[in-house]
Amino acid sequence: MKRHKCIKRALRGFTLIELLVVISIIAVLMGILLPSLGAARETARALTCMSDMRQLGVMITVFTVDYKDKLPANRIITVPGTEHVTWRHWLVRLGYASTEDAWVCPSEAPLGAFSEEGMVMHGRQCTGDVVANYAYNGSSFWSEASTSPGTAKGIGQIVRPSHTILLLESQEPFPDLGIWMHTRRLGDDGYHGSFGYWHKGQGNWLRADGSGFRMGFRDTMLDDCMWHNGQERIVIESTNDGGSTEVVDTTLPTVHEHPEWIANIAPAYAGTWN
């Protein structure tokens, strides 16, 4: 009889309290691990984004080799006076860069990715572009649309390639973004800026030497501004129509920061983002 009781006791299952304790422990562990897994996935997406930007930088470099050191024009005129395509479309068309995923940030920008195709700029309609989150640094590399795919600007003319931004993340349709875009894309909550901020509050950037880095938007213009080519001295001036434009100011030192820009971007890039 005693042996029979021992066997029955050994076959006894969990009590309800024991089962609830086990479930509670599993729930606590999942609560601890899931945020870490989410953060790891976001880090992986940010790294993939940076890798894509580096590949685009390589494609631009290959382009400059084929076009005698000349950088791609931001817009290429295909029908004089009426139509143009963007440098992004041109790189894809000539086989320098791939389509689709390589141009869209894997982390998904809050406002999405856009294309200039179909838009009318300077009296011309854009007939070719790709949906993209990546654009030129317009403050250094913007140029008037050209009938040639290469601009008058050579990559060898960049004075400080290890300090000058070449490509940046964007929530705009335009193929290039200059610092004049600092007030664009303001949402009702004031937190929708044009430039990258969705990698844990920072953006991915690519220098002209092909190296990538992650930084807050306003930090790119502190101490030694990364938006210019080392010799240009630029300030933003208001225009009569309420907009703004860049003006060369020779009274500024070559190495400079922009406290006036930082004050202007505060409404768009507030909180813990930058």
Image (cartoon, grey):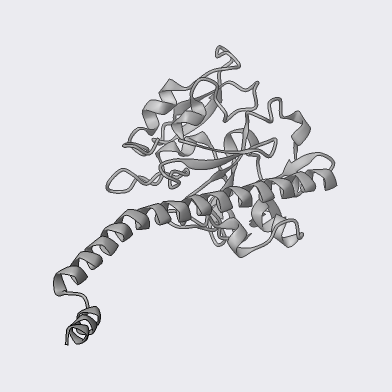
Quarter of the image where one finds residue 201 = top left
User: Dividing the image into 4 quarters, which one contains the C terminus?
Assistant: top left
On the rendered structure, is 120 left or right of 197? right
Give the vertical position of 203 relative to 100 (above or below). Answer: above
Q: Position of residue 78 (x, y in %)?
A: 71, 57
| Residue displayed at 22% across by 84% down | 3
Depth order, front residue of 235/66? 66
Depth order, front residue of 180/273? 273
Q: Position of residue 235 (x, y in %)?
A: 50, 23
| Residue displayed at 71% across by 29% down | 158
Depth order, front residue of 49/156? 49
User: Dividing the image into 4 quarters, which one contains the N terminus?
Assistant: bottom left
On the rendered structure, is 104 left or right of 153? left
| Residue displayed at 65% across by 38% down | 211
Q: Is residue 72 visible?
A: yes
Q: Is residue 129 visible?
A: no
Give the vertical position of 142 relative to 26 (above or below). Answer: above
Give the vertical position of 258 relative to 2 (above or below). Answer: above
Quarter of the image where one finds residue 167 = top right
| Residue displayed at 57% across by 53% down | 48
The tally of labels here is 0
Q: Position of residue 162 (x, y in %)?
A: 67, 30
Q: Position of residue 67 (x, y in %)?
A: 82, 45
Query: Which residue lies most toward the left here?
Result: 17
On the rendered structure, is 150 left or right of 246? right
